[in-house]
Image (cartoon, rainbow, N blue to C red):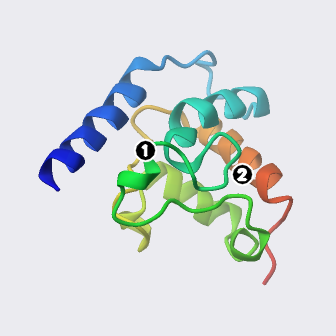
Amino acid sequence: MLVKNVMLFVGISVLLFSHSSAVASGEDDIGQGENNYQAYCSPCHGANGDGKGDLGAALSTPPRNHTDASIMSKRTDEQIFKTISLGGEAVGLAPDMPAHNTVIPEGEIRGLVKVIRRLCKCEYKK
């Protein structure tokens, strides 16, 4: 188990620190959001957002299926933003979800929220 967790940590760390942002200004850019999704999210959440990424199988909690509108429509954009920015544990979700606020600018995280909304084909419903 320890080896599996170390390998997962190393894999995520390599992905996080090897990717350089193309938009340094932090603009809310859907194109950059899609690039960031593939670089940072797809290893666990899958290239199509279905929660079946290669690294996801090693996690103690399965990654969220971003294509599931019944779940994603219950999350506000701000909740999704905070989860990406601060990590799962900081918002009462899976501790395996790392914080990305040190590697992805705020505007680009907002772009990721838009990408996730496209994947679920949904908006927040009270």
Q: Residue furthest right?
A: 121
Q: Secondary structure at mark 1?
A: loop
Q: Residue at x 51, y 36 (%)?
A: 40
Residue 29 location, quadrant: top right
CA neighbours of label 2 inside 10 A, class few (<14), some (14 to 19), many (20+)? many
Q: Earlier in the sequence, mark 1 or mark 2?
A: 1
The image position of residue 83, as x and y in percent, is: 50, 59
Vertical relation: 62 (above or below) 84: below
Which residue lies under the disc numbered 2? 116
- Give 13 or 25, whichever is nearer the viewer: 13
Relative vertical location of residue 53 with respect to residue 81 in this rendering, above or below: above
User: In the image, what residue type sits under mark 1?
Assistant: Leu
SS for dot 2: helix
Front one among 54 and 109: 54
Viewer-proximal residue, 22 or 122?
122
- Residue that appears at 41% across and 74% down: 92
Instruction: Please say if the residues under marks 1 and 2 sit with CB atoms less than 8 Å apart.
Output: no
Q: Quadrant of the C terminus?
A: bottom right
